[in-house]
Every structure is written in structure tokens, then in C-alpha cells.
């Protein structure tokens, strides 16, 4: 089954992580809740962290004009 296309445009971001961090990301892939690859898991976890920062009032997210 094909994955749905992304709803929002994306940009590439290159991060350097430790081998241990890579192992942690890889260990979450089989669970299937966060993504189907280590980069996808990392992106989803970053997104969840940003949402939590917004809920905590530490980050103010702007609504794109197309969603207003």
C-alpha cells in the first residue's frame, strides 16, 4: 500500500547524531508508531517535540496562510 503524499512542503535538514542515537531511532522503527525508517522516526519525534514546546508556551507556531 502506497503512503499518502505529504500535506506540507518539506525541506531537507542534515543532522549529525551519535551512533547510539542512531540505534535508538532504528529500535523504534519496528514498533511502527513513529515511522518506517530512522530518518522518518527522527522527523516525527522532532515534530512531536515542537508541538509539546508550543503547548508549554515556549514556542509560538504560526498558521500558514492557506490554513487560516
Image (cartoon, rainbow, N blue to C red):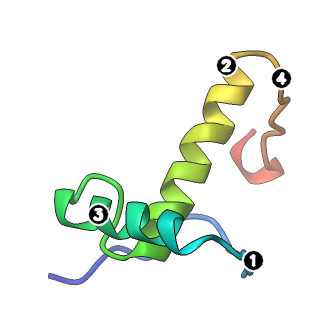
Residue at the disc numbered 4: 58
Mark before the other along the chain sequence, 1 or 2: 1
Please tell me which residue lies in front, 56 or 61: 56
Mark nearer the viewer, 1 or 2: 1
| Mark pair 3, 1: CA separation | 22 Å
Q: Nearer the viewer, mark 2 or mark 3?
A: 3
Q: Is residue 36 left or right of residue 24?
A: left
The numbered disc on residue 55 is: 2
Find residue 66 and report its horizontal and vertical position in percent.
Answer: 74, 53
Marks 3 and 1, the one that precedes in the sequence: 1
Helix or strand or loop: what does disc 3 sit on? helix
Residue at image location 71% in from the left, 16% down from the top: 56
In this orientation, does residue 6 appear?
no
Q: Are marks 1 and 4 in contact (CB under 8 Å)?
A: no
Q: Which residue is mark 1?
A: 13
Q: Residues within 10 Å of mark 1 (few under 14, many from 20)?
A: few
Residue identified by numbered label 3: 27
Sequence-wise, the earlier of marks 2 and 3 is 3
Amino acid at each position: 500500500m502506497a503512503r499518502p503524499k505529504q500535506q506540507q512542503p518539506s525541506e531537507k535538514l542534515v543532522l549529525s547524531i551519535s551512533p547510539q542515537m542512531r540505534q535508538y531511532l532504528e529500535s523504534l522503527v519496528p514498533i511502527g508508531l513513529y515511522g518506517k525508517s530512522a530518518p522518518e522516526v527522527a522527523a516525527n519525534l522532532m515534530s512531536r517535540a515542537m508541538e509539546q514546546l508550543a503547548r508549554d508556551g515556549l514556542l509560538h507556531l504560526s498558521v500558514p496562510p492557506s490554513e487560516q
